[in-house]
Image (cartoon, rainbow, N blue to C red):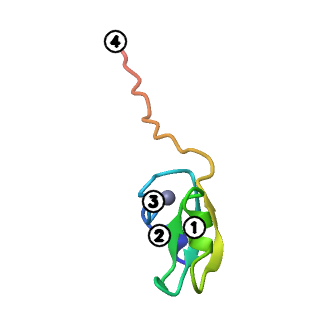
Amino acid sequence: MLLHLLPMACCERCSSNGSLHYRVSTTARPEWHFVCPGCWPTTSLEEGYRYGGTRKRSGRRRQRRPQQATTG
Ligand SMILES: [Zn+2]
């Protein structure tokens, strides 16, 4: 599983960037790719459709800069 190494992927069809994607593959596109919930119904009707999991962006990570303690 190299999922955690993938860059932030968006929907292969509409390029929408959401927090939820389905990992799918079809005959026309045998390699695993991600589609958004909006495109998934269409994708699931395609030939050779396979479902490979759901990817959620869990827990937002905020980049926090350590506050500099200014003494003065
Ligand atoms: Zn989409």
Q: Earlier in the sequence, mark 4 or mark 2?
A: 2
Q: Along the line of sight, which residue is nearer the eye, 51 or 27?
A: 27
Q: Earlier in the sequence, mark 1 or mark 2?
A: 2
Q: Is residue 45 left or right of residue 8?
A: right
Q: Quadrant of the N terminus?
A: bottom right
User: Farthest top residue?
Assistant: 72
Q: Quadrant of the C terminus?
A: top left
Of badges 4 and 2, nearer the viewer stands: 2
Of badges 2 and 3, nearer the viewer stands: 3
Q: Earlier in the sequence, mark 4 or mark 1?
A: 1
Q: Along the line of sight, which residue is nearer the eye, 37 or 7?
A: 37
User: Farthest left residue?
Assistant: 72
- The crowding category of the residue bearing disc 3, from other C-alpha atoms within 10 Å (few below 14, some 14 to 19, many at least 20), is some
- Say which mark, if any, is on residue 42: 1
According to the picture, the residue beneath numbered tag 2 turns out to be 5
Instruction: Give the quadrant of residue 37.
Output: bottom right
- For badge 3, the amino acid type reads Cys
Q: CA distance from mark 3 to mark 4?
A: 47 Å
Q: CA distance from mark 1 to mark 2?
A: 27 Å
According to the picture, the residue beneath numbered tag 3 turns out to be 10
| Residue visible at 59% across and 86% down in the picture | 48
Image x and y of residue 59, in percent = 62, 47
Instruction: Give the quadrant of residue 36.
Output: bottom right
Of badges 1 and 2, nearer the viewer stands: 1
- For badge 1, the amino acid type reads Thr
| Residue visible at 47% across and 69% down in the picture | 5
Please, what secondary structure does the residue beneath circle 4 have? loop
Q: Earlier in the sequence, mark 3 or mark 1?
A: 3
Please, what secondary structure does the residue beneath circle 1 have? helix
According to the picture, the residue beneath numbered tag 4 turns out to be 72
